[in-house]
Amino acid sequence: MLGEIETGHEPKFDFAAAGKPGRFYIIATLPRTGSTYLSHLLWATGCLGAPLEYLNFDPAGPWGHAAGDPAEQRRLWFEAVRSRTSPNGVFGVKCFPVQLQILAGANPPLLDEVMRALLSGRRAIYLLRRDRAAHTASFARAALSGVWREEQETGQTHAYSAQAMEEVAQGIGVMTNLWETMFRDLRIAPLRLWYEDVVASPAQAAAQVAEYLGVALDPAAAVAVPAVRKQSAPDIGDWARRYAQSKSTP
């Protein structure tokens, strides 16, 4: 847990009767794309694994105690595979490019395990935001304020930073290029989803993922997962408008 926030990594959310891994997929995404909402949406079906950030060993995260400890990272990974594979044999993981880059330098054996699993089926859900100005604003504000979840919001507004917006926009471009390069190099044809469509039609998004993975959804298999509250900072809309206007002004 992060303070009193349930992250979903807690053992009480393990599948009661986990299955043997047979289908592996990743949610390949970027920060501030609604990826936590999507991961919990898929998890709640009880048929699509529990695709959380099992490769995130940031000291501030739920598995921060494993930062700098490759052996513990591998133990946590294999424990996640054991306990977070849904009864029908589906295991998913959500990750950002930087997490794979860190593993490449700090824990190559674990990265090899992940890549072998990915190449076993070559299945990736590629989640992006169609509204680039809104994505940039959300990302930049979170980076500056340190507020990444609705539960952390205090209602405080933050001064617009054109520099932060430009830096984040460049970063988004770099990260999308990294994913596209990986898909091309590994011959993966990802299922491309847009944040806006997922929020508008969550059931349809879950059905698309199930069809892509070749999995039948069973309503009786649904499980309870931690609630995900949409972050609604009062100044994000203004940041997005100012950024969009700056790009449209000659």
Image: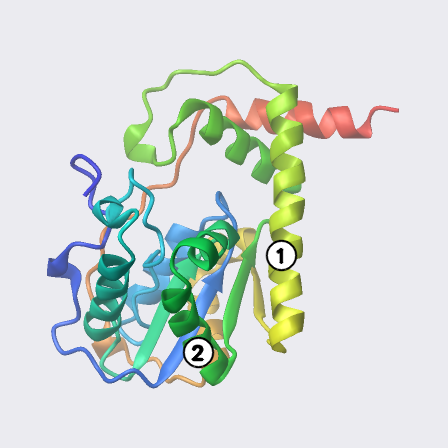
Task: Tell me if residue 157 comes above or below residue 26 in the rendering.
Answer: above
The residue singled out by tag 1 in the image is 178
Which quadrant does the C terminus fall into?
Answer: top right
Which quadrant does the N terminus fall into?
Answer: top left
**Residue 130 visible (yes or no):** no
Residue at the farthest right position: 250
Viewer-side residue, 138 vs 102: 102
Residue at the farthest top position: 159
Q: Residue at x 62, y 56 (%)?
A: 178
Viewer-side residue, 4 vs 220: 4
The residue singled out by tag 2 in the image is 116
Q: Earlier in the sequence, mark 2 or mark 1?
A: 2
User: Residue 238: x and y, percent?
Assistant: 58, 22
Task: Tell me if residue 186 comes above or below residue 75 in the rendering.
Answer: below
User: Residue 112: x and y, percent?
Assistant: 43, 71
User: Residue 189: x and y, percent?
Assistant: 61, 75
Q: Residue at x 35, y 51 (%)?
A: 56
Q: Residue at x 68, y 27 (%)?
A: 243
